Amino acid sequence: TGVYVKTIVYIAVFYVNYLVLFDRCINKPHSALRFVGYNVVLFVVAMSIIYVAWELIASNQPVHSEYPPVANLSANASDPTEFKVGEEGHWAMSFTRFLRDAIILILTITLSLAIKFSNKWVATERQREAQRATQREEELKSLRSQLNPHFLFNTLNSIYALIDICPETAKHAVHELSHMLRYVLYENPSTVTLKQELKFVDSYVSLMKMRLKQDVKMNVTLNSNGHDNMLIAPLLFVTIIENVFKHGDITNPSKPIEIAITAENDVVKCHTFNYVLPSDKKTEGIGLNNLQRRLSLLYGDNAILEVNRSSDT
């Protein structure tokens, strides 16, 4: 019976701390002092209950049922129920029992506090992770929204340049642009297959070729090497390829343009090379900055963007 009473007291102390005291004290002024003060009161009440329960139970049981006799036995030792404990032994047993129960109570309080802190830390981390994920998603949406006007502006500039030179070509370019805008604006998943992305890049390059002279050399390689169904984030390469036509010297046949997107061993590589116009400023605009940020958010250390510039390339 005594064991059951103690167990109930320990369980009560655990849950009073876990469900009540921790929440009443956390994030309050002098929270540690409050928590210790409440637990001192709880400790005294719990020890009092244990002591009263033990005394009530012990008064109805022979002493030797819990402890062996530590004093001289009475003359009539044939009956074990007549074993008596001397005063010194009684105090020793009481102190031992008190120390044992006190240690168990302190460990119970400590365990409750440790579990509560652990659960709160896990909950806080989950909340922070959810906030980071939401913030990351919103930032990606913002970057995508900046990319679309940037892409549209550059493409329309190219078509505008064709209107006076070749109206029929300009009409065809508008038709191509409509298909591309559907991909950019309406087909807006978080990932696309490499085949879809290469098809979009091929359409964009074909559109830009309309601006070029026939004798301008352009080496274009778009090869998935059997990785057609590899999933990647959409519109990762368009900014780099845009810069080839926006900042490149695309009028000189002796200055070829190179565009290559290849896949190998689950790694996609996009490489571009072009000569730059003498008047082109050597500064990175919003396009590359946004691309770098998108790569960081989407792929972290698994993505690398390198820009190597010389005086004319």
Image (cartoon, helix red, strand yellow):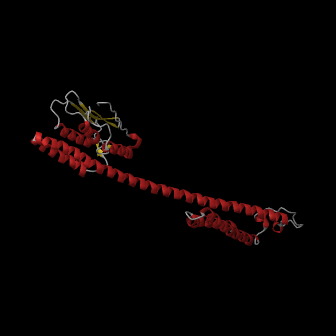
Q: Nearer the viewer, residue 281 or 193?
A: 281
- Return the residue found at the far right: 75
Where does residue 247 sit, x and y in percent of width and height?
Answer: 26, 37
Whether residue 189 can be seen here: no
Q: Nearer the viewer, residue 77 or 239?
A: 239
Q: Quadrant of the C terminus?
A: top left
Q: Horizontally, is 165 left or right of 250 in the view?
A: left
Q: Horizontally, is 55 left or right of 257 in the view?
A: right
Whether residue 128 can be seen here: yes
How many discs mark residues in the rendered view? 0
Where does residue 170 sit, x and y in percent of width and height?
Answer: 13, 43
Residue in the picture at 23% in, 41% down: 199
Q: Quadrant of the N terminus?
A: bottom right
Where does residue 102 sit, x and y in percent of width and height?
Answer: 70, 62
Residue in the picture at 21% in, 49% down: 182
Q: Nearer the viewer, residue 56 or 234?
A: 234
Where does residue 204 sit, x and y in percent of width and height?
Answer: 21, 41
The vertical placement of 287 against 119, above or below, is above
Q: Nearer the viewer, residue 66 or 107?
A: 107
Instruction: Tell me the quarter of the picture where residue 208 sits.
Output: top left
